[in-house]
Amino acid sequence: MSNDKAFTEEQKQFLSGFAFGADVARAVSGLPVISNGSSCGGDASITVGSKTTTTLPIGPEKIALIAQQETESAGKTLCKEELAKKEKNPLDIWDEMQARSDAGEFPKGTDVFLQKFHGLFYVAPAQNSYMCRMRIPGGSLRGWQLAGLADLADRSAGGYLDVTTRANLQYREIPADQAMNILYGLRELDIVSLGSGGDNIRNCTASPLSGIDTCELIETIPLAKRMHHYILNSREMYGLPRKFNIAFDGGGTISALDDTNDIGFHAVRIDEQHATADFPAGVYFQLTLGGITGHKDFARPTGVLLRPDQCLAVAGAIVRVFVKSGDRTDRKKARLKYVLDDWGFEKFVAAVEEQLGRTLGRFDESKLTRSVAENRLAHIGFHPQAQANKNYVGVVLPVGRITSDQARGLAQIADEYGNGEIRLTVWQNLLIPNLSDADTDAVKERLTELGLGYEASSFRAGLVACTGSGGCKYAAAETKTQAMALAEHLESQFKLDSPINIHLTGCHHSCAQHYIGDIGLLGCKVEKGDDMVDGYHVHLGGGWGDRQGIARLIFESIAFEDMPDLISAIIGGYLDQRRDGETFVEFTARSSDDELKSLARALV
């Protein structure tokens, strides 16, 4: 049989699919692809009769390109973002961005999405400007870098910096003609933005007290930095179906919120009585997967236990399996959680082991010792370090924003009184470590001169807000200014003996992680007379770590002008009705929805 007439159409389709699948398998395995009986060293195609199938890709991005091809071969339609990446590699558009910047123009169409791979977000219509997100691995930077960032903010951005909920930094109000000045300026400060947006692994977080915590099991900032460089130097790490988060938690005083990440590495200890030949006594990392609290799910234990030196390779294998298997047709289902929901953990971990070429060790979770050292106020104020006569100070940054002058002042404090180091936290504030006992009063005075606090009320200590409608096209409410107004009102009403976290997020993307707040506020528009005004859906009782839980929706569509009284009524009811020593989360957990609604029934 030598021509198409020898095959029915059904047979030709079967043979085409079979041959394509075989060559995909060979390509993924690194074997030469067979096309018409010959070995191919570059792109390859498969011919059945006179019908040639799609060319097979080569190069470091091939697993992502093959995943796209397999999706289309299965008769499915790639989403528009996948089509954009297929048409143009977003990592290779530097000259295009330079040309736009030189012309003072913003991107259009799918280029808006592709440019996010370089950390540049065109945020119209909220602002006719760029936002630029950086990569600060482990949240650790030096004073000279922060001072340089402040200068760059004055030259090319809005004259301020925002600390994010990934212990990271962002610029806003960047004009079109300053885009490349920002990208070059960051690199000159040894800071990169590559992969900080788009379908990439975001800033790798760690315990902010790594190396100075009196209670931690292991340092984690060095691991976050290694993970950062591994990502930057592995092109396969840029072919994801959607964004991806990785966190390392050393079991210390300030949580890294690892259970909200796609991959969480949480430090645990094996004591002598539970040690085995495969797992001697010592500190390991418990591998958890699938956290995405915006979709109401926390990372769950896999049973896998890892030595610190195994974490990077395992993370790389997990990402590669996700690249191959993630949904490329529906952005809402393109996160790791949905692969895990579909496959189950056992199948997914088996695929990771196949990718690694070895089996991962399991250990009985009940025999592990976990740290219970977390202190919800440890990120604010002066606290002793593990090093003798040394302290760190947690500085209050109102909803994460500092002016360039404040940034330069903080850099000077770190250089003059510390060792030049500054650490960002997931709570939208920063720490200055390695301060001598004798310098505490001087540092307090300098912070006061900058207009920054080091003592927080229980409200400001846990106040988290996303950018809001002032800088994000998705947000339905002006979260940052409204968060400050709400905190001021509550501080005038109450003094608490334990913190209550309030998270304000402007939209369903949940950048401020409203589902894990004691009180989580999700922005919405509310009809008020003839107008649509800013408002929120009110969720109560969220938590993380040992208090893990998704906050419950209790009040819907409350206009912001009514929020101060509503939240006051909720907190007042809690203080009146709580049992001895009962936290807000414990109170909400034992209260029914109707009981919680009754706290403010007269107001809604």
Image (cartoon, rainbow, N blue to C red):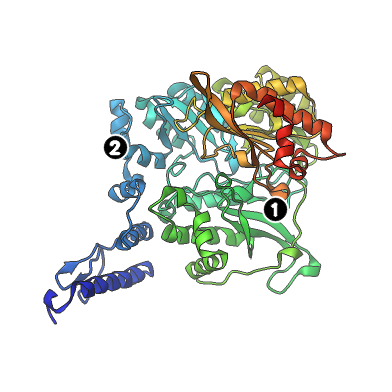
Q: Amino acid at mark 2?
A: Glu
Q: Position of residue 21 (x, y in %)?
A: 32, 70
Q: Which residue is mark 2?
A: 96
What residue is at 54 percent from the left and 40 percent from the top?
136
Callout 2: helix, strand or loop?
helix
Q: Quadrant of the N terminus?
A: bottom left
Instruction: From this view, report whether residue 115 is shown above or below residue 129.
Output: below
Task: Report whether residue 207 is seen.
Answer: yes
Q: Position of residue 44 (x, y in %)?
A: 24, 66
Residue 580 relative to residue 215: left or right:
right
Callout 1: helix, strand or loop?
loop
Instruction: From this view, report whether residue 362 is shown above or below residue 83.
Output: below
Task: Report whether residue 456 is seen.
Answer: no
Comparing 545 with 138, the one in front is 545
What residue is at 69 percent from the left and 42 percent from the top?
209
What residue is at 73 percent from the left and 33 percent from the top?
598
Q: Which residue is mark 1?
A: 218
**Label 1 Cα neighbours within 10 Å, binned few <14 / some 14-19 / many ≥20:** many
Residue 83 relative to residue 259: left or right:
left
Q: Position of residue 231 (x, y in %)?
A: 48, 51
Residue 285 relative to residue 109: left or right:
right
